[in-house]
Image: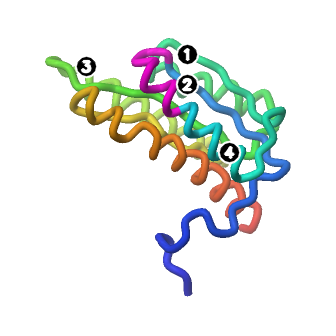
Amino acid sequence: MQHADQGSAQGLDGTGRRVGIVQARFNEPVTAELLRACLAELAALGVAEADIRRVQVPGALEIPLALQALADGDDFDALIALGCIVRGETYHFELVANESGAGVSRVALDHRLPVANAILTVENEAQAWARAADKGRDAARVAIEMAQLLDAL
């Protein structure tokens, strides 16, 4: 039996897969890096550029609604959420992090559609930059892996 952490990209094939990406503009330099890494990994996994639909929203709280609209309107195999929430001095961080995460999960469950959540929740900008490329790549892999898994179930 193979462990889940062995060869995470083994057997992943995005050929013919349609993927929707919702990117928050808030903290856009970081979300642009998330997007760059995500798109590069999707291409490496065989997802055609023509099969990717990308939309932008103002911030992380708006991501679930856009994901829901994509799930309602088009025939996607998976969706990806890209955002960055940096802790501030108020409770706003917890509110945005919790509500955006819950909304992303709800879209996935309500639509029975894989949604890879790459909304970074970090203490500072340095942490965001340290994670952006890896999380962007991870989101692409998760989207394709979960699309394949749901096809098999």
Residue 23 marker:
2
Residue beneath label 3, please? 92
The magenta segment: 25-34
Secondary structure of the residue carrying tag 2 is: strand
Which residue is pictured at 50% across the width and 74% down the height? 6
Q: State the mark number for residue 144.
A: none
- Mark 3 or mark 1: which comes first in sequence? 1
The disc, 2 or 1, on the residue closer to the chain's N-terminal end is 2
Earlier in the chain: of badge 4 and badge 1, it is 4
**Residue 38 point in image, percent of width and height:** 59, 39
At a point 49% along the width and 30% down the height, the residue shown is 33
Q: Earlier in the sequence, mark 3 or mark 4?
A: 4
Q: Which residue is mark 4?
A: 42
Q: CA distance from mark 3 to mark 2?
A: 20 Å
Q: Which quarter of the figure is the N terminus placed in?
A: bottom right
Contact (Cβ within 8 Å) of mark 3 with mark 1: no
Q: Tell me the kind of residue under disc 3.
A: His
Q: Which residue is mark 1?
A: 57
In the figure, is residue 150 to the left or right of 49?
Answer: left
